[in-house]
Image: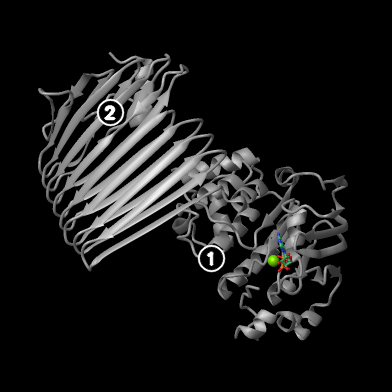
Amino acid sequence: MLNALDNLMLEKVADMHDIPKGAYNIRKNGEGIQKNTTENIDIITKKDRPGIDVIIKPNTKKESVYIPVIVTEQGITDVVYNTFEIGENADVEIIAGCGIHNSGDNKSQHDGIHEFFINKGAHIKYIEKHYGQGEGTGKKVLNPKTIIHAKENTTVELELIQIMGIDNTVRDTEIQLYDGAKLIITERLLTNIEQKAKSNITVELLGENSSAQIISRSVAQGKSEQTYYFDLIGKNKCRGHIQCDAIIMDDAVITSTPKISAHHSDAQLVHEAAIGKLESVQLIKLMSIGLTEKEAEDTILKGFLK
Amino acid sequence: MLELKDISLSVENKANILNKVNLKLLDKKIYVITGPNGSGKSSLARIIMGISTPTAGNIIFNGQDITQLDITQRAHLGIGYAFQSPPRFKGIKVRELLNLSMSSGSGEDKICDLLYSVGLCSQEYLDRDMDASLSGGEIKRIEIASILARNLKLAVFDEPEAGIDLWSFNRLAETFKEMHEKTNATIVLISHQEKILELADEIILVANGGIERNIPKEDILRKGFIDDKCKCRANCGKAGDKNAECIG
Ligand SMILES: Nc1ncnc2c1ncn2[C@@H]1O[C@H](COP(=O)(O)OP(=O)(O)O)[C@@H](O)[C@H]1O
Ligand SMILES: [Mg+2]
């Protein structure tokens, strides 16, 4: 059912070298094509609109769910609504990710709207990789929307990665953190040629002792454009830290808009943002141990985006 | 093995940082370059590595004029430079940097030896990122290791003592001695440190845009010209502390 191209795309976006052992749902060109559930993880296809409900039982430990999406045809606009219900004290990894292969001249687009209900004490790691390829002029577009309700004492780790081949992306992330909830977002973005990427992250620290850490690193090359908007809202005794670090090259444009607002005298919010070019002393160091300028540049960027 | 011919360096707002410097270094010797802060020691080293381009003059390396060669080309000829203020890297591990430095085919054992020789425990450091989480002294020692890793004909170490505690420093002095005994490299140490001065086959003084050769070690230690001439040190309360790093 999966061909070589499918397998390549699955490997790129979900590090899947094989059909995973546990729960998974593979969506291709707008349709669910293969799925598996386990005793603790159920995946139900929605009746009212495209998408799935992923239901993870309380206390499920060390299991993973793979829910990759691949688009291999041109001219497709795939909109999908996924809902995740994570049971109390579960500890799971969710590997999403979307790959588009577009060899035609018409646009291919995937909009994934993901909503997470994370119940008390649960820990999730959510990894979303975006990747595009294909020689046609058709645009490859990905617009993910992620909404997370993190209940008491949950830990939420998000890894949002887009390294290659997406022409246009608007990424919206909205998160609510209740008492003792802890959020860590790692965002990595590389754009080149005329690609455009927009990332809006809004975090509401509603609960006492909730905390959020957002580490965004990006590289903009060619004539690409990146726009960031971070909004951290502290409504209780809480801690929030945004660290946004961008390397700008060629004729790229990067705009980063930080916003922090405190509605409580014990809210501690920090925003750090830096945009700059590759540090020449780093290049010189690597060249002085024998790398060419190009190799040095690649090594630095690869590390930076790791 | 290395010959500097009438090397001069001026920059926009500073003329004659170096003024017609002539210097010949021989194979397999240890040279210590010393001199007041801002006298042009690092500039000289950067010119040798190809990081700075001299305003005038030529650089001959084993018979070849390398004045026009870039940094990478000089690295391939076997020239190495340990930075006075090494850069940090986000997302690059100590292991990766050392691997990049080493000639291919060297294994993990070699990396452990290298870290040990600069007084670092490999288990603790190999998987650390080369970022701001490392202290200045740690970064500095890894920088030195990255030069020891290479199979060099000419190795220049720029103030290796800076930021390094005394115990590790003694270890480091041993390391330079070993390097001298076990390899054929010509070693240039930019330093004010007595332990390092003691290693020298010859001490070279850089001052006022020029160099003086064959300075007796005793002169430097006795006169303590570094303390005298460094205005910063006179004002900063570190006066008299020979091991204090002076950030001029
Ligand atoms: N790129 C530069 N621009 C301006 N001044 C410089 C530059 N490089 C070096 N200098 C100046 O040249 C002098 C010598 O510097 P340096 O070689 O670093 O001295 P040292 O290593 O002996 O302390 C200093 O006064 C320094 O400020
Ligand atoms: Mg110097």
Q: From the viewer's perspective, is the residue at label 2 or at label 1 nearer?
A: 2
How many marks the image carries: the answer is 2
Q: Tell me if residue B42 comes above or below residue B224 in the rendering.
A: above
Q: Tell me if residue B87 comes above or below residue A7 in the rendering.
A: below
Give the chain of mark 2.
Answer: A
Give the chain of mark 1.
Answer: B
Q: Amino acid at mark 2?
A: Asp
Report the residue marked by disc 1: B136
Q: How far from the left and from the top, in percent, is residue B130?
A: 50, 54
The answer to whether any part of residue B185 appears in the image is: no
* Residue at the image point whose x is 69% and y is 81% from the top: B231
Report the residue marked by disc 2: A111
Residue B52 located left or right of residue A210: right
Between A123 and A272, the one lying in front of the other is A272
Q: Are marks 2 and 1 on the same chain?
A: no
The answer to whether any part of residue A260 appears in the image is: yes
* Residue at the image point whose x is 84% and y is 59% from the top: B8
Element on which disc 1 rests: helix
Q: How far from the left and from the top, in percent, is residue B55?
A: 83, 55
Q: Tell me if residue B101 comes above or below residue B10 in the rendering.
A: above
Q: How far from the left and from the top, in percent, is residue A247?
A: 50, 46
Between B87 and B153, the one lying in front of the other is B87
